[in-house]
Amino acid sequence: MAKGKIRKYRKPINLNIGMIIFGGIFIYVVICVIMYFQTSHIVRYEVKEGSLTSDTIYRGVILRDETVVYAQTAGYVNYYIREGERVAKDDLVYIVDETGRLSQEISNSSLAENSLSDKQLMEFRSELANFAHGFEASHFSSAYDFKQSLNNTLLKLANDAMLQNVEDLDGSSGINIVNRSYSPRTGIVAYWVDGYEDLTAQNVNMDIFEEETYEKKRMVGNSLMAAGDAVYKLSTNEIWSVVIPIEASRGAQLQEEGFVKVRFLKNQYESWGEAKLLSNGDGNTYLQLFFTNSMITFMSDRFLDIELIVEDEVGLKIPVSSIVEKEFFLIPEDYVIPGGNNGGDSIIRQRYQEDGTISSEVIEISVYNYDSETKEYYVDSSFLDVGNNLYKLDSQESFTVSKRATLIGVYNMNKGYADFKQISILYQNEEYAIVKPNTKYGLSVYDYIVLDADSVRDDQFINQK
């Protein structure tokens, strides 16, 4: 039997209509997915009433009229005025023991054994109570300041009794033991310096608030000082101020109000401060608050935590990303006819016919704002061109369109397209703005606006998401 070639049997092509339909659907789905990711989708935001709860607690730097007094002679300094106490011109503030023999002479004369009077004990207890009331663990360094202040108070109370016998000691020993130093002017006494005594509001910058680098030098009673050392300082004016860093918009609002109610967190006292906005050289914005009382209370402080007692603005809360600027033509009110066929406003515009003759036509327009001071309407620029001539109703007086201005607003999408609505911002932070509700050309509660204003064009039809 002859061997034959074996050939592979080829099946005939059998098209399955189900597979064709499935393939077509698959390709369509793939194309739709690709187009979905390549197309920008407009997200809507529902307008609701709300307020912005902003941080109203600030840390500020205290500015006062301060004069530093320097020691004229070297020796052991003993103070006779308590810190925070007012002195008149020529009042005795401290004495200098140049020889170091004052303590020895006092000890020999049994002058060191003195008990405190009821008045002195009251001063001592008052100082303790004030510190305990205002102490915060987050600023523990104030405990060291209080310790030094307390030491000076105790020395002052003890030195009051010693001073009564200094003249007797001078006479009995035949030696001029001390040199007295008197106040050069009226003021409040403080026994510390930090280098900020000449700081002005215009020179405040953010480096001032880096308290890790802040150094405060305390003067301690009965300590040895050289001639030329700072021995105490005087605050010579009852008017003082606190400078705080603040957001530019909030600072401008507070300055416009004039006076701001402030709570001092150290003792929970409240006072009114006159507000002044500062734009210093470092590019930041600061608010200076002037006070005419309570300076003595904070004589030992350079930095102070304060709370601004302000009412939160309440209105329509919208994202900052929704806000956009748009340009409009300004049309005098005499050239706008209120109430057209559809209840809208209209204008009479000059029109050139095909045969070259001039006629007029009435067209409806969209008005977005009205300025009551200039008596002008903000009209959408899509209805007009620069150079168009408008007529008054029942008059041949004309107006040439040219003047432009911008409005701040958002895109309303209630009607399915991007419709600009003007807004009046009451307050704004980095994320949200509070706008005035129910204005004639503005927004209302539950309106839908475009979340990202950069994602749409004016009058664009919107596929909502």
Image (cartoon, rainbow, N blue to C red):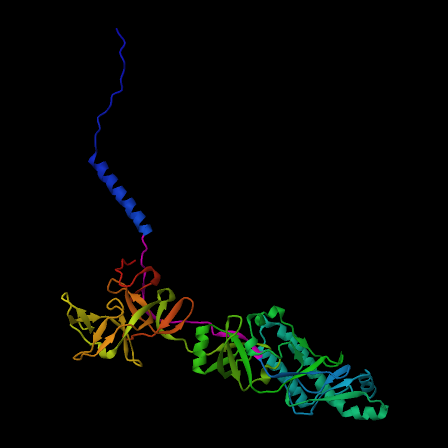
Q: Quadrant of residue 389?
A: bottom left
Residue 32 is left or right of residue 119, and the answer is left
Q: Given the current orientation, which residue lies at the most extreme top position?
A: 1
Is residue 303 highlighted in magenta? no
**Vertical comparison of 318 with 149: above or below:** above
Q: Nearer the viewer, residue 154 or 381?
A: 381
Is residue 54 highlighted in magenta? yes
Instruction: Estimate the x, y position of residue 55 in percent, counting from the top left.
Output: 47, 72
Q: Residue at x 29, y 44 (%)?
A: 30
Q: Residue at x 57, y 87 (%)?
A: 238
Instruction: Estimate the x, y position of residue 154 in percent, counting from the top left.
Output: 70, 83
Residue 406 is left or right of residue 351, and the answer is right
Q: Nearer the viewer, residue 180 or 100?
A: 180
Q: Nearer the viewer, residue 17 or 74?
A: 74
Please state, as top left, top right, bottom left or bottom right, where the N terminus lies in the image. top left
Q: Residue at x 24, y 78 (%)?
A: 333
Instruction: Estimate the x, y position of residue 216 in percent, counting from the top left.
Output: 65, 75
Q: Quadrant of residue 331?
A: bottom left
Query: Would you say residue 446 is visible in this rendering?
Result: no
Range drawn in magenta: 39-62
Q: Residue at x 21, y 37 (%)?
A: 18
Residue 248 is left or right of residue 438, and the answer is right
**Vertical comparison of 367 with 33: above or below:** below
Query: Would you say residue 455 is visible in this rendering?
Result: yes
